[in-house]
Amino acid sequence: MKKLRLLSGAALIATLIVAGASRADTISYADAVSALAKACGTDIKKFCTGLNLGNNQIQNCLEKNGGKVSPTCTSTLTSVTASIKQRQAAQIGFFKLCEHDAAEFCKGVMGEGNILACLLKTKRIDNGKCNQAITDAGWR
Amino acid sequence: MFLHRLRAGLALGLLIAAGPVAAQQLDDRQLITSLSQLSEAAPAIDVALLIEEANANVGKGVASQPNWSQLTHLAQLLVEIDFENDSVAIEPESYRTVGLIADALHHPNLMFYKFLVVGHTSSTGDAKHNLKLSQERADAIREALTTTFAVPPDRLYAVGVGQEMPVDAANPKAAANRRVQLINLGRAK
């Protein structure tokens, strides 16, 4: 596998996001990938040569070599995986959690994307579960 | 579930970047906006017919073929995803681009739509080999998106067209011809 080349800016942002991942904010796939490339790049080159991005091959490889990969890589992998799971759950949960608010505040709005845009403008949902789902889903 | 139809975009659904968008310039909002610009008159695309036309026209080009020519009417975006030489292994520096595509495909604007991944090569090398490699690379991108990045597999199609549809036809060997097209095929179900 060739040298990991990443924009330092993107990597920095990703690191900041990972650092905050224990709170409500969740990580995007793009930032998760960048964070892993930064924290695990050396280990991936050492233990996972020739594996492709699909089928969770790289994650599985890092987990399989858990005793050998760097502690930074292991902890990043753990936090990124947890954060992605939280985001996926919020994206799936959004429709149910926001159904009531959508019916109340966005009546007649057509299309999931337009309903989200309407909810984002609706201040009255600011403290509810729907609001939290939108944040966790990464849709702000 | 909100089962309403997304109101089709008003403008004719065309947004073709001048060249592939590199990861550092690409963000998921740009992806979502470009891919959401649906035309009311978007044609239905049969992926099997695209593959048939590509296989029947190796070295001759497919741009004027009935099914390939329809693709220009659909909302789409060009992205750059680099692969190791003569391999289906995605270069680590392109992982972020695949992640960005995944983020966009999980957004409510796009999450109920089907997409086609089209792999293109330049004319360097053998045309038949290029066709095969581009299909395998398009498959690898689809596989990454549908497994590691959890996009439902029934929303994604992959097709390779080798060197048969260059973006820079005057310079078929130009690097700009190596690219990935991401095309919105319309609402799923």
Image (cartoon, coloured by chain):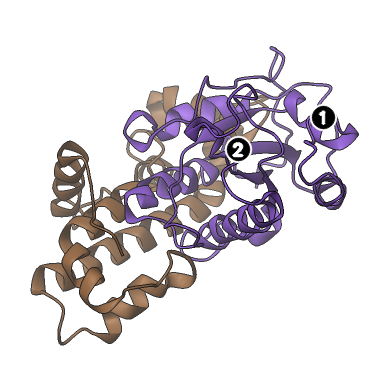
Chain colours: A brown, B purple
Q: Is residue B113 visible?
A: no
Q: Position of residue A124 (x, y in %)?
A: 40, 28
Tell me where residue A32 sits by quadrant. Answer: bottom left
**What residue lies at 70% left-to-right and 58% top-to-bottom?**
B154
Quadrant in the picture for the C terminus of chain A: top left
Q: Is residue B140 above or below residue A110?
A: below
Q: Which residue is mark 2?
A: B181
User: Within 10 angstroms of label 1, few (less than 14), some, or many (20 or more) residues?
Assistant: some
Q: Position of residue B152 (x, y in %)?
A: 62, 59
Q: Of residues B177 and B79, which is closer to you in this image?
A: B177
Q: Give the letter of the chain under mark 1.
A: B
User: Within 10 angstroms of label 2, few (less than 14), some, or many (20 or more) residues?
Assistant: many
**What residue lies at 31% left-to-right and 55% top-to-bottom?**
A33
Instruction: Tell which circle, 2 or 1, labels the residue nearer the N-terminal end.
Output: 1
Q: Give the letter of the chain under mark 2.
A: B
Q: Is residue A127 above or below residue B141?
A: above
Q: Of residues A26 and B150, which is closer to you in this image?
A: B150
Q: For this view, does B49 lie left or right of residue A110?
A: right
Q: Element at badge 2?
A: strand
Q: Is residue B6 above or below residue A93?
A: above
Q: Amino acid at mark 1?
A: Gln
**What residue lies at 72% left-to-right and 42% top-to-bottom?**
B3
Q: Of residues A117 and B129, which is closer to you in this image?
A: B129
Q: Which residue is mark 1?
A: B70
